[in-house]
Image (cartoon, helix red, strand yellow):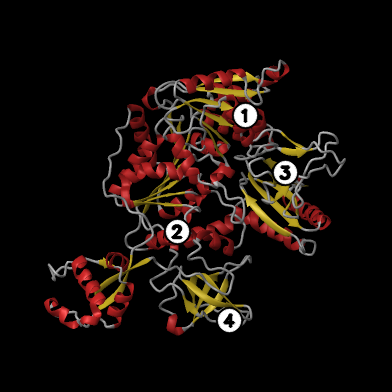
Amino acid sequence: MSYADIILPVPLDCLFTYIIPDSQSSEVLPGTRVLVPFGKTRKIGGVVLRVHNVRPETGNLKAIEQILDTEGPSVTELQLKLMQWMWEYHICSPGDVLKAALPGGLRPDSSTSVPVYRPRTESFVRLGPAVNGKDLKYTSLLFDSRCRRQKEVFDRYLSLSGLDRNPASPKAVTKKHLIEASSGTAALKSLIEKRMLEIYEIEIGRLPSSDGIKAEPAVLSDAQQLAIDGIRKSFTEKNVCLLHGVTSCGKTEIYIHLIKEQMAKGRQVLYLLPEIALTTQIMHRLARLFGDEMCCYHSGCADSIRAEIWKRQCGDNPYRLVLATRSGVMLPFRNLGLIIVDEEHEPSYKQEDPAPRYHGRNTAIMLASLCGAKVLLGSATPSLESYCNATGGKYGLVELSERFGNVALPAIETVDTADLMKRRYMQGLFSPRLIECMDHALKNGQQSILFLNRRGFSNVVECPDCGWIQKCDCCDVSLTFHKTAGTANCHYCGRSYRIPDRCPGCGGTHLHGRGYGTQRVEEDLRRLFPEARVTRLDLDSARHGYESILTDFQEGRTDILIGTQMLSKGLDFDNVQVVGILQADSLMSYPDFRSGERAYQLMAQVAGRAGRRLEQGHVILQTRQPDSELLNYVTTGNYASFYASQMHERSLFSYPPYSRLVYVSLKGKDENVVSTAAISLCRSLSEMMGNERVLGPDAPQVSRIHNLHIRRILIKAPLSIGIRELRKKMTDCMNGCRLLLKGVSVSFDVDPQ
C-alpha cells in the first residue's frame, strides 16, 4: 500500500500522512493537489510532498478523496525543495509556506470548499450536425416564411465565417460577434435547438498580448560594456554577482542584454523588483523588447491572472521572462538560467506578516542554487550584508561609477533648518533655498520631487491646553490626522476615528494636528506655487491608482511630486531637476541598528532621481544636524567610507553580518500572561545559548496592535550554529515553557529587516 505525506494549509508544524487508493496510485505524484478529510466532518485541500510505502506507527489513517490536478502536478519538485527550505529556515509551519506560495485560484484553504482554477474561455459558433457536410447552396430551403429572422442570422453567420465564399477554410466567429452583427439572440437560440448551429468553447486566456513588433536593445556605453564583461567573467567563478552602480548608470540596460543572452540559450529569467509601482514602469520598457515572451506577476494582479500565469509556467510553453515582486520566487520554472534582483537593498523584499517571513533576495539565491541558475544583485546603495559578501569573495563584484551619458551626479546641498527656524526664515517645511530652486525649475519647465517619509496631514491630533493626544483604541499608538478624509487614522490596524469636538481631558475646543505629513506639504505647496501642478505619491494616493500618478509625472503633466519612500525605489524620470529631502533627521533617529543604513540608502536613492539625463540635478537636504557624519557620507557619495564605519559598529555589538538575528515575538490578549511567558522563555533561551546572545524581553515601540500585547526577544546566534540546530534549541525551550505559553502565540522572524 502507498502513502502520501501531504502539506495542508493549517498552522501545525508537521506533515499529514494519507493512504493513496489503489485506483489513484499512478496519479498521485509529488506536487499534486489533493482533497482529503480533516477532522470529523471537514475536507481540505493540500499538496503532496512525497509518496512512500512506510506506514506511520500511530494513528488511524484516512484515504485521499479526490485528485484536484487532472493534467499533472501544479507544484514542481524544485518548488517543493524550495518550500521545504523555507519552512525549515524561517521556523514556520509547512502550511504557512503553502498559503504564501500558491495563488488564490489554486491555493487549497482550510474551509470546506477548495478553490478551483477555471481557465477563461470564449464562446464560438460553428455549423451544427443538421447542416454540416451538406451543400450550403440549398440551406435556404430549410427555412419557411415563419423563420425569416432565423434565416437572416444563419446567412449572417455564413457571411462572417466566409462559408458562403470559401467553404473549405471558414473563419472563427464568436457568439458575441454574431449576436452584435445580427441582433438575433432569440433566433440564434432557435438555430442551436434545431442543431443548425452549435456553440463551442475555446480557452483564450486572461493575459494581454503584444502587437508582435519587438524593439532592439540600446547600444551599451563603454562603461556598461566593461560592466557586463565583468559580470560574465564573475559568473564563470561565482553563482552570485553584485552590480554596484551609481544611480542612473544604466543598470536596466545591462539587465536587458543579459536577459537576451539567456533567452538565446533557451533559458528562463526571473527579474525581481521591490515594488508594484516599479513593475508598472519597467513593464512597458521590457514589453517593447520581449513582447509575449514575458509576463508580470505580483500581488496586485487578480487571482485568476496569477493562477493562469502559474498554469502556463507548468506547461510546455512557459514565459521566458517573468517580471515580479518577491512572490515571483515561488513560481514554477523549468529551465531557469538567471535571476536579477534589482534594488537588492530594499526592505520591501522582506515579508513581515504573515509567515513565512522570507526575504525575496535570499530566497532567490537559494532557488538559484537548487536549479543551477546565476543571480545578479543590483543597487546603487547595496545592503551591508551583500557588499560584505562581495568584498569578501563569496559573491562576484562589479562596480559602475559613472552615469549613462557622463551626466554628473546631483549636487547635494545641506541646509540647516534649526538656524533658519530661529531666524524665522522657514515657511512650514520649506527653506528659502529650496523654494528658490523649485521656483527656478518651474520657470524652466523642469520638475521637482519632495521626499517626506510620513503620510497623512499631521503626525498627531492633540489638545494644546492639556496635551491630550488622540490614540487608537486597539493599538498603543497615536493617530495620524488625514485632512482629505477628515478622520484620524491608525496606520497599524487601519481603523478610522472621528475627531472629537471637545477634548476628553479638559473640554477644550481647540484640537488641532501637530507635525507634518505629505498631505500638509501638498497643501502648503499649493499656496507657495499656485500655478504649479502638484500631486502626491504615498500609500493613500496609491490606492486610487499609482500608475496614473507616475504616468502623469513621467509625461510632464505634473510639476511637483511629493512622496514617501515609494519615491526611492528606482523610479526613472527624465526631467527632474530638483529633489528636496524635507526632514532628514527623522530618518536617522529610528531606534534600530539598521537606521543608519536605511537613512543613507533612502537619501542617496531619492537624491539619485535628480538630473538623470541632460544636466546636473540639485538636491536640497534639510536637517537640524548639518554636521552629522552620516549626512557627510550622503553629500559626498562616499559609500566605501560609510560601509567601513557601519561595519565597525556592527562588529562591536555582534550584529549582522557577524551574527544571525532571530526575533521571537509573543502576542496575547492578557498583558500579564504575555509578559510572564516572555520572561520565562527568555530565561530558558539564555540558559541554553548564553546571556550575551539573548536580549529582552522588551516591549516594541508599538507594544499593542489589534488589542494584542506584544513582547519580543532578540537572539544573536553565532554563524557557527546552523539553522536546524538553532530551531531545535528554540523548540526545546518552547516545550519547556508550554504551560506558560497557553493563550500566547509565538512567531519567529529569522534575519529581520
For marks 3 and 2, give the CA distance.
36 Å
Of the numbered discs 3 and 1, the one sitting upstream in the chain is 3
For marks 4 and 3, give the CA distance.
52 Å
For marks 4 and 1, give the CA distance.
68 Å
Q: Residue furthest top?
A: 423
Of the numbered discs 3 and 2, the one sitting upstream in the chain is 2
Kind of residue indicated by mark 3:
Leu
Eye-nearest disc, 4 or 3: 3
Q: Which label was assigned to residue 524?
A: 1
Residue at horizontal 55%, vertical 44%? 348
Which quadrant, please, contains the C terminus?
Answer: top right
Of the numbered discs 4 and 2, the one sitting upstream in the chain is 4
Residue 402 versus residue 669 in the image, above or below: above
Measuring from the top left, give residue 636's x and y in whole percent: 54, 21
Q: Are marks 4 and 2 in contact (CB under 8 Å)?
A: no
Kind of residue indicated by mark 2:
Arg
For marks 3 and 1, give the CA distance.
21 Å
Q: Which residue is mark 3?
A: 479
Q: Which residue is mark 4?
A: 61
Q: Few, some or many C-alpha atoms within 10 Å of disc 1 (few <14, some 14-19, many ≥20)?
A: some
Q: Which label was assigned to residue 306?
A: 2
Of the numbered discs 4 and 1, the one sitting upstream in the chain is 4
Viewer-closest of 45 and 359: 45
Residue at horizontal 42%, vertical 60%? 310
Residue 297 versus residue 550 in the image, above or below: below
